[in-house]
Image (spheres, rainbow, N blue to C red):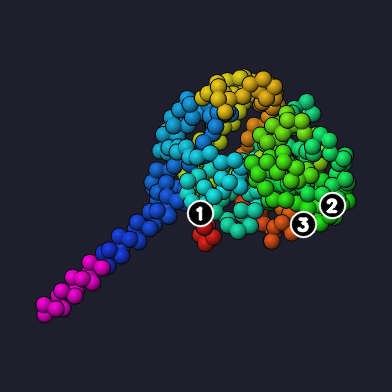
Amino acid sequence: MFDFRHRSRLAAAAAAAALLSLAAACGGQAEAGGAGGGSGGTAVIKLKDPGNAGPLAYAKREGILDKRLKAVGARVEWGGSYASFTATIDAVRSGSVNVLEGAISPALGYLANSRNIKIFSFTDPVTDRSAPPRDGLVVPADSPVRSVRDLVGKQVAVNKGGRGEYLLLLALRQNGIPADQVKRVYLNPVQGASAFATGKVDAWWAIVDAYPEVVAKGARVLLNGRDLPDRDLNIWAARTELLGKHPEAVKVLLDTLRELTEQEKRSPERFQNVFLKKGPTAVSGARLQDNLTEARFQNVPRFASAVDGRYVEDVAGVFRQYGVLPAAIPSAEVIFDLRAPAAPVPSGRAS
């Protein structure tokens, strides 16, 4: 009898320990998933560090998001710094970030393997030619390359499965050049800048901050994305758990972004050098003026809707044509309309 009771107590203790472990695991998964807890828990908007400029930097300094999210039972967490959407994706996988900005192109590469993020906002492209371009195919000033056709047999640095690769493929297609006649060298923005500066590649499709920096150093521009039928819109995406359980918190974020972007268009000076006036993240001179001009011309992020599927499908079509994407991605599965009635969070592919 003693042995039976002893073993019963051991079994009960083991079962309790197993339940505790399971509960801890579930809690950890919920946190990593980005919802900040269970369906009834506090929503946590996890963003990368906004840097020293822009609406989010201003919102962080002024505590705007903290106040507005608190009103809907949510809060914001600011994470680390990442050079690109692709780099930020690693933080999404680990749970350090659950809302991120980028373009359709790099999002497709992630969505091809995991459907745990959805796009909730698009920003229409700037069509005014007076606005400074934000990307371009560049070559050294003394390069014999004068056109896209001259790239045959050359090496071009691009970010793999991202905007640089998309635009290069678009340019090659428009000029009737088979993609296999130009070697794509896959490098992130920092690696691309180094390879270009040291002559290890013949050309580079520079994007975002890397573009004005390399042009300022004397690079010659062959063409920009706006010279092409570019459908790769800027986006905001979030983890599906966060969107499904706490859409009101994500809407507060987007509403704040929209409001502050409107303010930045009118008074861009307030949104530059937000934290530091001097130092490595501060800008001045021609670069500052370029940023101010860009801010005045920018478009305001808008709510995503089903009709935006055409942009996703067009970009995916280019990647599918050249073997960058292994399979089609139904746009209806990756777009989330914050204005639509709430729907249950899909189960299954959540990792």
Q: Which residue is mark 2?
A: 153
Report the residue at 67% width, 48% height from top. Answer: 187
Q: Earlier in the sequence, mark 2 or mark 3?
A: 2
Residue 12 falls within the magenta-colored stretch: yes
Pick the front one: 195 or 178: 195
Categorize mark 2 by other alpha carbons within 10 Å: few (<14), some (14-19), many (20+): few
Q: Which residue is mark 1?
A: 345
Categorize mark 3 by other alpha carbons within 10 Å: few (<14), some (14-19), many (20+): some
Report the residue at 88% width, 46% height from top. Answer: 149
In-image side of 95 versus 13 (left or right): right
Q: Nearer the viewer, mark 1 or mark 2?
A: 2
User: Element at badge 3?
Assistant: loop
Q: Are marks 1 and 2 in contact (CB under 8 Å)?
A: no
In-image side of 27 versus 273 (left or right): left
Label 3, label 1: how many angstroms apart (C-alpha)?
Answer: 33 Å
Amino acid type shown at disc 2: Gly
Pick the front one: 205 or 322: 205
First to last magenta residue range: 1-14
**Residue 155 in view here:** yes
* Rendering quarter of residue 340: top right
Looking at the image, residue 88 lies above or below residue 208? below
Q: Which residue is mark 3?
A: 322
Label 1, label 2: how many angstroms apart (C-alpha)?
Answer: 48 Å
Q: Residue lying furthest front in this view?
A: 198
In-image side of 257 versus 286 (left or right): left
**Residue 39 in view here:** no
Q: Earlier in the sequence, mark 3 or mark 1?
A: 3
* Rendering quarter of residue 325: bottom right
Q: Nearer the viewer, mark 3 or mark 1?
A: 3
